[in-house]
Image (cartoon, rainbow, N blue to C red):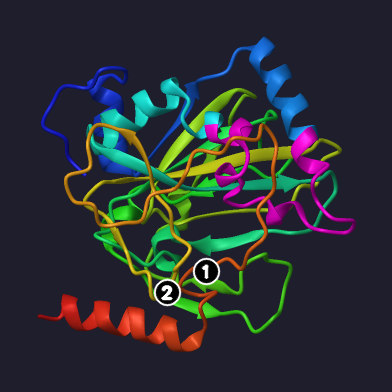
Amino acid sequence: MPTDSEPKTLANTQVAAFRSDGYLTGLPVYTPAELGQLEAGLGQILALLDPGESTKEIREWHETSRFLYDICMNEKILDYVEDLIGPNFYMWASNFFIKEPFTGESVTWHQDAYYWPLEPRASVTAWIAFDDVDEENGAMCVVPGSHTLGILPHNRLGGEGSSVLDLECDVSSLDLETTKLVELAAGEISIHSDQLVHGSPPNKSPRRRAGLTVRYSPTNVKCDLSVNPHFRSYLARGVDDFKHNPTGAIPGATYGRLRREHRSVEEAGETAESAFWGDKANDESK
């Protein structure tokens, strides 16, 4: 995802590291005072969940909550993203990933782009740390450079194990000795490529691990609406000369929840998954 201009916020060495490794970490965004405001807002968001409902349901609520929308559009975050994917890009997804203390759930090795009906593959994720994140409480692990290998096979787990995903990336061709831990202080973010192989272990500590992921794509990236008809884009920087995707409305309420079925390639079902990846395989063989 090269850009033609000099970076405005990141150092040239950081941009080069992202191109080489597929991720950057330890990027400061929020001050301690701002973190207090985020935590208070998170409490308001959590209160909107139904009894017994998982925090994983807090997904795309930026469409109904101005509090979350404003986080997604934080100028400091957008500055970093612009240096990596260029001046014209939109925001389209947000998810909370909260691991409570002593929880056994893990996230298997995967590539985000496998699940997203987007072409071309050029998107990035900002991972915003609401808490200090380290090895003890289940920090994300990445395989540097794996984003250069294209989409790898993902195999079904058959309901076994404690992973929140039903698939696991085939990492047999990767050198897992190079795996890196993405540790963050509260208020920092990491950014990773949509094709980077990553996952995370369970939280074995007495501390919570809360993070919000936000997804950004250059304006030439188009969603397959037959897979995800709910897709909405929000122009974050620059101009959209392509007009590939439906646009979303900025929410009016400070705190509001979204109720709808989510649709990724996998969530759309076996038929959509086979059709989408079958088409991609055919395209790439030409």
On whether residue 277 falls in the magenta region, the answer is no
**Disc assigned to residue 56:** none
155 up-or-down from 70: above or below: below
Q: Amino acid at mark 2?
A: Val
Q: Position of residue 43 (x, y in %)?
A: 80, 33
Please tell me whether mark 1 sits on a helix, a strand or a loop.
loop
Residue located farthest toward the right when viewing the structure as drawn: 51
Q: Which mark is residue 227?
A: 2
Could you say whether the residue bearing mark 2 is in a helix, strand or loop?
A: loop
Residue 63: in magenta span: yes
**In this rendering, is residue 21 above or below 165?**
above
Disc 2 to disc 1, C-alpha distance = 7 Å
In terms of sequence position, does the residue under pointer 2 or pointer 1 come before the other? 2
Left or right: where 191 falls relative to 255: left
Instruction: Report the front residue among 171 and 210.
Output: 210
**Of all residues shown, which one is farthest toward the bottom?**
271
Q: Position of residue 248 (x, y in %)?
A: 44, 48
User: Could you tell me which residue is drawn at 90 percent across and 56 percent down?
Assistant: 51
Query: Which numbered circle lies on residue 263?
Result: 1
In the rendered image, residue 15, in percent from the top left (x then y), is placed at 27, 30
Horizontal side of residue 101 vs 218, given as left or right: right
Amino acid on which disc 1 is placed: Arg
Count of numbered tags: 2
Label pair 2/1, CB-CB below 8 angstroms: yes
Front-lying residue, 278 or 201: 278
115 over 197 or under it: above or below: below
Which range is magenta? 44-69
